[in-house]
Image (tube, grey):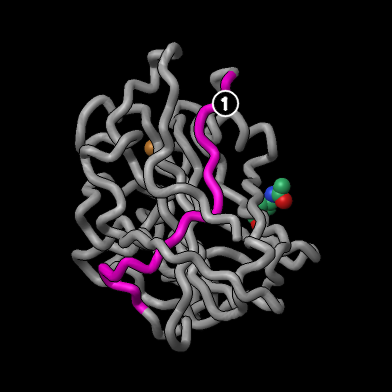
Amino acid sequence: MFNYALVLVAAASSVAAHGYVQEIVDAAGKAYTGYLPYSDPYTTPTPERIVREIPGNGPVTDLSLIDVQCNGYSEGGVAGSAPAPIYATVAAGSELHLNWTTWPDSHMGPMITYMAKAPSDITSWEPGTDAVWFKVDEVGKTADGLWAATDLLLASDSIYTFTIPASLQAGQYIIRHEIIALHSAYEYPGAQVYPSCIQVEVTGSGTAFPTEFVSFPGAYTADTPGIVFDAYDESLDYTIPGPAVWSG
Ligand SMILES: *[C@@H]1O[C@H](CO)[C@@H](O)[C@H](O)[C@H]1NC(C)=O
Ligand SMILES: [Cu+2]
């Protein structure tokens, strides 16, 4: 049984602690509301979103779970990456702006974006543990010691922007975007992964497609560079986890 007032109190007190993508804006300025974990489940009729359902604003720390794919949880009511009912249409080569809820400045870390092409209808596809993901963007720590999250994200009004590779072949894709918070990443488990999966149809006449892919779970383990890291040692360079960026 859910007590709505208690849920609201819990949401209000934890919003300050973590976060998720609350809005997606395309290059033409069209805005799509993200999956809102503290209101969508209690709204009738259920709002249709382009973002796959997440349980809340908290992180995934066990990198072996399907939870690390789209932030759906493996235990309880939501499948690991249960499909969303609709998708956005975006042109190859165009920018997408991902609007995060206010990110706590204690949670420093990289922001990384992957894509995976759906072999069939995106609104029913679950990649499971298949190696289908390729990285299209990453931002870690600058030479000046500024982190993607929180420094750069806060400086841009909580908007993270990346470009759909211009030569990418058309089709339906999941965009898997994440912050990995490193404030307690001294050992494993410790790094906090905050993934979101956004469903899009990419248009254009491109023909390019990568040849190397990773899986989620699978891409990150305790031994992956950048998962265990002392973020408070400012002398350290940071290696962003995962494969090289594919830019088409
Ligand atoms: C981000 O989304 C929220 C909720 O829709 C909105 O209030 C806010 O203005 C957006 N931020 C920017 C910079 O557009
Ligand atoms: Cu937190």
Residue 206 position by quadrant: bottom right
Q: In this view, does 13 lie to the left or right of 94?
A: left
Q: In this view, does 77 lie to the left or right of 203?
A: left
Where in the figure is residue 223, as x and y percent of width and height?
A: 22, 38
Identify which residue, 188 or 9, lies in the foreground: 188
Asked if residue 155 can be seen in this view, the reply is: yes
Queried whether the magenta region covers residue 198, the answer comes back as no
Instruction: Report the residue at 21% width, 29% height from top.
Output: 187
Report the label total: 1
Mark 1: C-beta under 8 Å from nearest atom of ligand 1: no
Where in the figure is residue 164, as x and y percent of width and height?
A: 64, 62
Q: Is mark 1 on a helix, strand or loop?
A: loop
Where in the figure is residue 216, as x and y percent of width and height?
A: 31, 60
* Residue topped by disc 1: 142
Asked if residue 13 can be seen in this view, the reply is: no
User: In the figure, 105 relative to 71: above or below?
Assistant: above
Instruction: Report the residue at 80% width, 65% height from top.
Output: 28
Badge 1 crowding class, 10 Å Cα cut-off, few under 14, some 14 to 19, many 20 or more, is few
- The quarter of the rendered structure image containing the C terminus is bottom right
Q: Is residue 159 left or right of residue 122?
A: right
Where in the figure is residue 91, as x and y percent of width and height?
A: 71, 71
> In the current view of this chain or complex, which residue is farthest to the right?
28
Queried whether the magenta region covers residue 133, the answer comes back as yes
Chain part drawn in magenta: 126-143
Residue 145 position by quadrant: top right
Instruction: Report the residue at 40% width, 61% height from top.
Output: 212
Instruction: Report the residue at 71% width, 63% height from top.
Output: 93
Question: What type is the residue that disc 1 sits on?
Answer: Thr
- The quarter of the rendered structure image containing the N terminus is bottom left
Examine the residues drawn in magenta and state their main secondary structure.
loop
